[in-house]
Structures are given as C-alpha cells and as structure tokens.
Image (cartoon, rainbow, N blue to C red):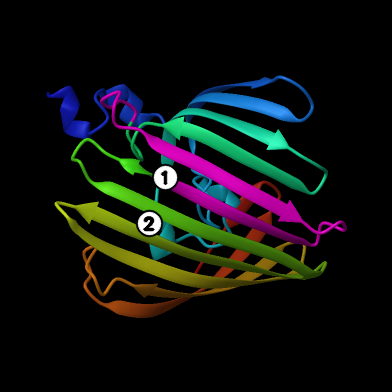
Amino acid sequence: GDPEATGNGFFSMAAIKQAYLTYAASGKVKFTAGKFATHVGYELLDPQLNRNYSMDYMFSYGPFSHTGFKMDVTATDNVGFMVGISNPTDMAFADFSKKFYLAQFHAGSPNGKVTGYLNYVGGKDNSDVTSNQFDLVLTGTVTDKFSIGYNGTVKSVKYMGSTNSWWGSAIYLNADPSQTLGITLRGEYFDDKDGAAGFGTSFFDATLSFDIRIDNLTIIPE
C-alpha cells in the first residue's frame, strides 16, 4: 500500500492515538513533544473521560490530535498558558514549511468552581489551505451534584482566495444524583451556512446521556 494514503505518511503513526514525552523543567514549566490530544474543545479524545458517548459536531469537525512540541506554563495557582508548534492538524508527518501554531490561556476562580479556557490552533496545511480556529470552554460547579459546561468555537478556512467559516455553541448540564448514576443533557447549535464543513446549513441537536457506573465499568445509554 501507499504510506501516503493515510495522510500521515506512515500507517503505524496513523493508528497511534497518542505517543509523547514530557519534561518538567520546574514546578511551573513543562515541555511536551510527540503526538498528543488536542487542547481544543470541551469534549476529550479519550472517550471514557466524556459524559456523552457520542461526539458533538464541533469536536467531530475540529482537531483530534497534534504532532509537535508545546510548552505549558503555570503562572499562578489559577492562571496558566500553553504555546506550541505542530504539523497540520491530525497529521503525524508533513512538509517542514507547513506548520500549525497552538495556544491556550486558562484561568480559574480561587475556589476552583469556575474555570475558563481560551484556545487557538491555526496554520497552513499541505494542500495550501489556511485555517484558524478560536475556541472557548467554560466550566462551573454549582453544587456537588450539578455542574455546567459551555463550549463555543469558530473556524475559518481560506483556499484560493476564498474564505469560509463555521461556528458552533454547546451547553452541557451535568447532574449526579448518586455515585452510580450521572445524567448529562447536551444542546448544540452548529452553523455551517458557508459550507466550510460540508453541510451548507445550520441545525440544532440535543443529546441526553445516562452514565451508569458499576465499579470500573461505565455504561452510557443515550
């Protein structure tokens, strides 16, 4: 087969979800190199860490992973930032001249009940498509049994002088009435009237998920 068919340049790297090394230069600075999960979005690459089994459209059409180098800095107990450089989104190998830039700023309240993340990823890929994505994640703990999450994102795509974009907004209402049961209602609005993601329209979707926890087993009907 053709190694380039995967878009990653090598079949084994396409199959590896994450493979990276980290080095803590101090208690406030950490370096990471390799293939690592994206910092963009409320939902996470590892499915067992999400309360909804299905992915929302913003995560599905955003980045999954980055192969490159990043630096995380903890400025204070409640404030930190990350900067990095990587191959184009989801590609393990790429032309050296085609790179993406990564950034994140996060801050939280002193009691840890409210946190916010402002994320960015952008650059030019091997097809000479330039994209920029800005992403906001907010989380809030109301009580020990109820929390709220919000994710808003916008991505612009420029190719051959034409720029199109899509954007989305989602809220997550999380309830945990007991240690064995969690309930999450996700409502998402996805706008792709420019056709940047291939839809050419806008729509709203809602997902109700039940997290049933039995020891180390989690079952998520939705």
Q: Nearer the viewer, residue 217 or 74?
A: 74
Residue positioned 31% across, 78% down in the render: 202
Image coordinates of residue 4 in percent, x first then y, are 17, 27
Image coordinates of residue 85 in percent, x first then y, are 45, 32
- Residue 178's place in the image compared with 203, above or below, is above
Magenta segment, which residues? 92-121
Q: Residues within 10 Å of mark 2 (few under 14, many from 20)?
A: few
CA distance separating discs 2 and 1: 8 Å
Q: Is residue 97 visible?
A: yes
Image coordinates of residue 8 in percent, x first then y, are 27, 30
**What quarter of the picture does the N terminus occupy?**
top left
**Residue 9's image quarter?**
top left
Residue positioned 76% across, 30% down in the render: 28
- Residue 205's place in the image compared with 88, above or below, is below
Residue positioned 39% across, 80% down in the render: 204
Which amino acid, by three-letter code, is at mark 1?
Answer: Phe
- Contact flag, marks 2 and 1 (Cβ < 8 Å): no
Q: Does the magenta portion include 117?
A: yes
Q: Secondary structure at mark 2?
A: helix
Residue picked out by circle 2: 60
Image coordinates of residue 112 in percent, x first then y, are 82, 56
Q: Is residue 217 left or right of residue 206?
A: right
Which amino acid, by three-letter code, is at mark 2?
Answer: Ser
Residue picked out by circle 1: 64
